[in-house]
Image (tube, rainbow, N blue to C red):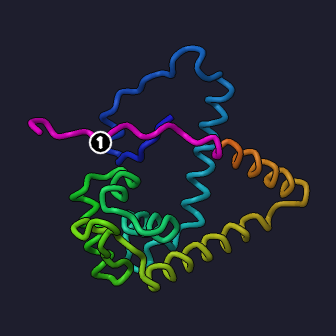
Amino acid sequence: MYVALLTNRQANKMPLRPLPAGLVSDRRVALANRLNSAAVHLLRRIGQDDGADGVTGARLSALSVVVYGGPQAMSELARREHVALPTMSRIADALVRDGLVRRIAAPGDRRAVRIEATALGRRLMECGRSRRITRLAEELSALGERELGIVERAVDILGKVGERGSPAPPPARRKPGR
């Protein structure tokens, strides 16, 4: 199932469509809803300092893809971040200006541009990741041994769910007249 992040304005314009009958049980939908809500709240809490260094969420997201996924062609980065190429170009311009990434020629096609993380960009991402992990470990310290074991097992199971992968996202929509 393909899931895209939407702004509140976009989400308010979208009609709610029920899942096709028989696709997913009510129990699984209810569990998915609770898991989604818990994950969002937890990520917000542990990521509350993200952006304190002046880097926006969109830039941090793109930087993360480049740091952990390696150099990316602009078109691939835009596709992975679910934004249009001009939007990604503006994000990349800001990251270059901040010294977090650099543009490099793509192998085999000197006209194509790839985005590569700088040492500063990698340090920024690693510091943020370390900060979030420390915060999460602090949150987990409130759990007893039994609850901690349950969370460990749940993470193992969720890892298996994530390994199944998801279908490729739908192609980017083209503007009318193109």
The one of 45 and 172 positioned closer to us in this rendering: 172
The residue positioned 28% from the left and 68% from the top of the image is 113
Under circle 1, the secondary element is loop
Question: What type of secondary structure mainly makes up the magenta span?
Answer: loop
Q: Is residue 146 above or below residue 46?
A: above
Q: Is residue 16 above or below residue 57?
A: above
- Range drawn in magenta: 162-178
Q: Position of residue 30 (x, y in %)?
A: 64, 31
The one of 169 and 138 positioned closer to us in this rendering: 169
Give the quarter of the figure containing the C terminus. Answer: top left
* Residue that mark 1 sits on: 172
Residue farthest to the right, as pictured? 146
The residue positioned 65% from the left and 22% from the top of the image is 25
Q: Residue 156 vs residue 134: left or right?
A: right
**Amino acid under disc 1:** Ala
Q: Is residue 113 above or below residue 162?
A: below
Q: Is residue 68 magenta?
A: no
The residue positioned 58% from the left and 63% from the top of the image is 45
Residue farthest to the left, as pictured? 177
- Give neighbour class at mark 1: few <14, some 14-19, many 20+ (Cα, 10 Å): few
